[in-house]
Structures are given as C-alpha cells and as structure tokens.
Image (cartoon, helix red, strand yellow):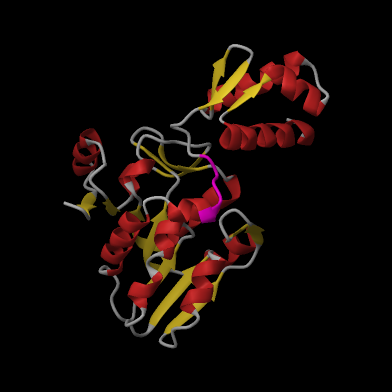
Amino acid sequence: MSTDTIKRRETIIDMLYHDGSVKVTTLSQRFNVSLVTIRNDLRYLEKKGCALRSYGGAMANNKFAFDRPFQIKGQIDRALKILIAAKAAEFVQDGDSLIIDSGSTTAEMVPFLRNHHALVVMTNALNIAYQLANFEQIDVIVLGGNTRKNSYSIYGSVAEQQLAQYRFNTLFLGVDGFDLEAGITTPHPGEAHLNRIMCDVAQQIIVVTDGSKFGRKSFCLICETKQIHHLITDSRIPKQYREKLAELGVNVIIVDE
C-alpha cells in the first residue's frame, strides 16, 4: 500500500469521525483521484469496521473505536471514570512498581495516588507524568519516543526498547475498544505495539474502562480478553460480557452497583 493511499484513508477516517458521513464524488474531487479509487478506499474501510457503505458514499460505524482527541474523551462519562479510577487505585500498595497507560480514565487515577509511598510509576502519558511529578514520594519514569498529539502519549521503537528493560507489578490499561471476539483494541498501531509490551512486562493487567467501550473494536489488537486479570467498569457492561469474562477467570468489578 502506497504512502498516498495510507494518508488518504487516514484523512477519510478523520472525516467520518468529525462529519459522520462522506460522499464518493466529494472525496474524488478533494484527493484528485478516480471514483473507483475512492470506492476501493471505502470498501477497505468497511472491511476494517470503521465505515458502513451507503448510496453514493459511507457513514461512520458507531461501533468502531475512533481515535478521538483527549479533551473530548476526557469529558465523556467523567463521573464514572473517576469512580473507576478510585477503585483501580485500591489495587496499589506502597512500594509497588506500576505502568499507567495513557487515557482519560487512567488519568483520573493520579489524585488517588497522592498518599502512597515509595511507588515507581512508568507512563507513556505526558499529562499523567506531569501531574505525578508533583508527588515527592513517587518516582516517575517517562518513556521517550514519538508524540501522539490526540492523546498526549508517547510511542515508537525508543519507548518499546526502554520499556522492555523493566518488570512491573501492575499495568493499568486504558482501552478504546473491548470486544469479546476481537479482544482489546486501539486505532493506533504504534500505541498498540507499545501496549502489548506493557502487557508482557507486568505481573497483572488491570483494564479500566467505562461501559461505552464494550462492543467496539478498532484496527489494532492490544491483547485478548483472557489475558487480563481484573476489569473495572460500570453497570453498562452487557450481561454476556460478564458471563464470558467470569468463564475466562477475569475478575469483573462494577463501580456503580
């Protein structure tokens, strides 16, 4: 796949997210390519799950986990995210070594770590690192690499090599999509690869997510559902998810029941 094709399809995904739909003729004129090329793009995006073909164009698939800006994600269901973050912080013991993944729910954990002592926290989130740096009793390690402006996060080979040198007690993992069959997914391949390494170097994986993420899936796999140890979420989790996760041995914690 050429670089032009990749960039064009990424732009179309952004348009689907912001506008909700796109037209073949409009896209053809914008990118100066044929109608056939645009139809092939939309067919590809439909197979990937982010678009639903319609007459003369396509609509955004609401079950797809789009890469939304942090400022927008952070305001959605914030009260529930704070409850989830508070419960997640209860798993932290003084002297622990932690990875806190980037994300709007994981970011809400920071105030609940204030009174802990002798913590080592590695994070790929610039906003989380900045806030944790104010706590003298927490040793903060920030991964280096490329910056994702949408999420204030770091990814890339430098971050991966750095992370692989360590071992941690617990990973607190944020998610964009949580599907029983597809697993835990994210739209960004670089961040997905880094998240997979996070899973490899942590003794236990705790997923923190609000109920809006269930049934959504995106391009890039982070891990299968059976790999996680605890899931902290709200009561919107579908019944079949609770039952299947219990079969897999995943401890499901509902914060608003």
Taking the image as shown, residue 31 lies to the left or right of residue 245, namely: right
Residue 40 visible in the current orientation? yes
Q: Looking at the image, is 48 positioned above or below residue 65?
A: above
Number of marks: 0
218 in magenta: no
Is residue 152 or residue 57 the one in the foreground? 57
Q: Looking at the image, is 175 positioned above or below residue 119?
A: above
- Residue beneath the point at 83% across and 24% down: 32
Q: Position of residue 124 (x, y in %)?
A: 54, 64
Q: Residue most toward the top?
A: 55
Is residue 79 or residue 211 the one in the foreground? 79
Is residue 21 or residue 121 the one in the foreground? 21
Q: Residue most toward the left?
A: 257
Is residue 36 or residue 69 the one in the foreground? 69
Taking the image as shown, residue 138 lies to the left or right of residue 80, namely: right
Specify the quadrant of the image occupied by residue 55.
top right
Q: Position of residue 74 (x, y in %)?
A: 46, 56
Which segment did they paint magenta? 66-71
- Residue beneath the point at 35% across and 39% down: 214
- Residue beneath the point at 53% across and 68% down: 127
By secondary structure, the bulk of the magenta-drawn segment is best described as loop
Q: Position of residue 132 (x, y in %)?
A: 46, 77
Q: Quadrant of the N terminus?
A: top right
Q: Position of residue 9 (x, y in %)?
A: 68, 31
Q: Looking at the image, is 138 positioned above or below residue 40?
A: below
Q: Residue most toward the bottom?
A: 136
Q: Looking at the image, is 203 positioned above or below residue 193?
A: below
Taking the image as shown, residue 194 lies to the left or right of residue 117, namely: right
Residue 196 visible in the current orientation? no
